[in-house]
Amino acid sequence: MPEVITTNGWDQMRWERVEHIAPHWHVTILETTNKSRDEVAAESLAWCRRALAGEVEVIRVSDAVR
């Protein structure tokens, strides 16, 4: 639901970029409810490393700029 962040949002945020990629926007959810700060940090870092290695889907600037 991109309208959640775009409705009455700051015009300079270039919302059209989000609207262009929103149908293809996949997210990873890290369940942190019962985890310690150290566990959350480790899981977040592991996801970042996978993203940098190209192992998870991420939104790239080239995908949004058209």
Image (cartoon, grey):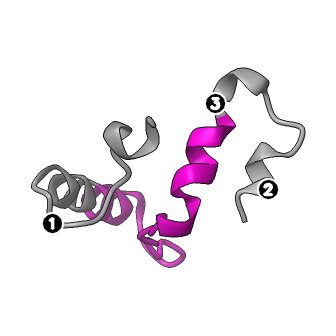
The kind of residue on which mark 3 rests is Arg
Task: Judge depth for marks 2 and 3 and give the one in front.
Answer: 3
13 or 17: nearer the eye?
Answer: 17
The answer to whether residue 35 is above or below residue 18 is below
The kind of residue on which mark 2 rests is Val
Distance from disc 3 to disc 1, alpha carbons, whole Å, reads: 28 Å
Label 2 packing within 10 angstroms: few (<14), some (14-19), many (20+): few
Which residue is the site of mark 1?
A: 55
The kind of residue on which mark 1 rests is Glu
- Where does residue 8 sit, x and y in percent of width and height? 89, 38
Q: Spot the residue most to the right.
A: 8
- Where does residue 29 sit, x and y in percent of width and height? 46, 72
Please report the bounds of the magenta region as a residue range: 15-44
Distance from disc 2 to disc 3, alpha carbons, whole Å, reads: 15 Å
Sequence order check, earlier mark of 2 and 3: 2
Distance from disc 2 to disc 1, alpha carbons, whole Å, reads: 28 Å
